[in-house]
Image (cartoon, helix red, strand yellow):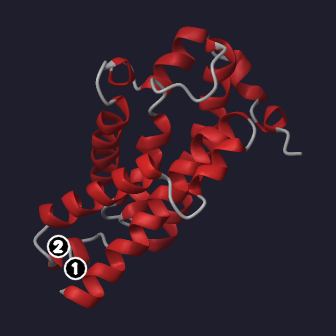
Amino acid sequence: MIRVDRYTMWTRALSTPLIVNLATIGPVGRVKRAPGTWGSVVGLAFYAVFFHNASPLGFILLAALSAYLAVAICHAAEQRLQMRDPGMIVLDEVVAVPLVFMGMGGPTGLIAEHGGWPILLAGFLLFRFFDVLKPLGIHRLQNLPGGLGCVADDLAAGLAACISLHLILHFFF
């Protein structure tokens, strides 16, 4: 069994309000209707600011660091809220959305080549499709312990959306 606590002990030094606000991205996760969708919008901004012009190695390192931090923070938030993967935790969506656009960024990448915002919109919609419906066994990842289960299904949804978007662009455009 995976012991998430061993890798997230540093979160004990952070206050509960800080952990919860990081996990909910402040007020974003407290939106009454579709907090995951709003978290995904923040994920688009996260991609645009930090990932869009990153080198391939930089992209992978930043994605790995973001995923690790999200697992730790979401794990601590679940424990402190005493809830399993509540909808108000949207940090998992935020860190997963950049994965949708892996291999597409930069000034000469696929996003720029295909007009920018239509690709971002298509990626966003594909991510929401895979995140909400959780096909292809993605739903099973939610059963992983603690914050790992909270984040892993979203990361898988981001990767599935990435593959789908690459295939759509390759075969139809």
> Percent from the top left, x then y, of residue 98?
39, 56
28 or 131: nearer the eye? 131
Q: Are marks 1 and 2 in contact (CB under 8 Å)?
A: yes
Q: Secondary structure at mark 2?
A: helix
In what quadrant of the picture does the N terminus appear?
A: top right
Residue tagged 2: 112
> Percent from the top left, x then y, of residue 93?
43, 42
State the residue at coordinates (32%, 60%): 126
Q: Quadrant of residue 14?
A: top right
Q: How many marks?
A: 2
Could you tell me the amino acid type at mark 1? Thr
State the residue at coordinates (46%, 73%): 56
- Which numbered dot is residue 123? none
Q: Secondary structure at mark 1?
A: loop
> Is the residue 123 above or below the residue 74 in the image?
below
Could you tell me the amino acid type at mark 2? Ala
Residue 133 visible? The answer is yes
Q: Badge 1 local density, few (<14 within 10 Å), some, or many (20+)?
A: few
Residue tagged 1: 108
> Percent from the top left, x then y, of residue 19?
56, 19
State the residue at coordinates (28%, 54%): 124
CA gap, disc 1 and disc 2: 6 Å
1 vs 73, left or right, is: right
> Percent from the top left, x then y, of residue 111?
22, 71
> Is the residue 35 above or below the residue 104 in the image?
above
Q: Badge 2 local density, few (<14 within 10 Å), some, or many (20+)?
A: some
In what quadrant of the picture does the C terminus appear?
A: bottom left
State the residue at coordinates (39%, 24%): 29
Q: Residue furthest left?
A: 115
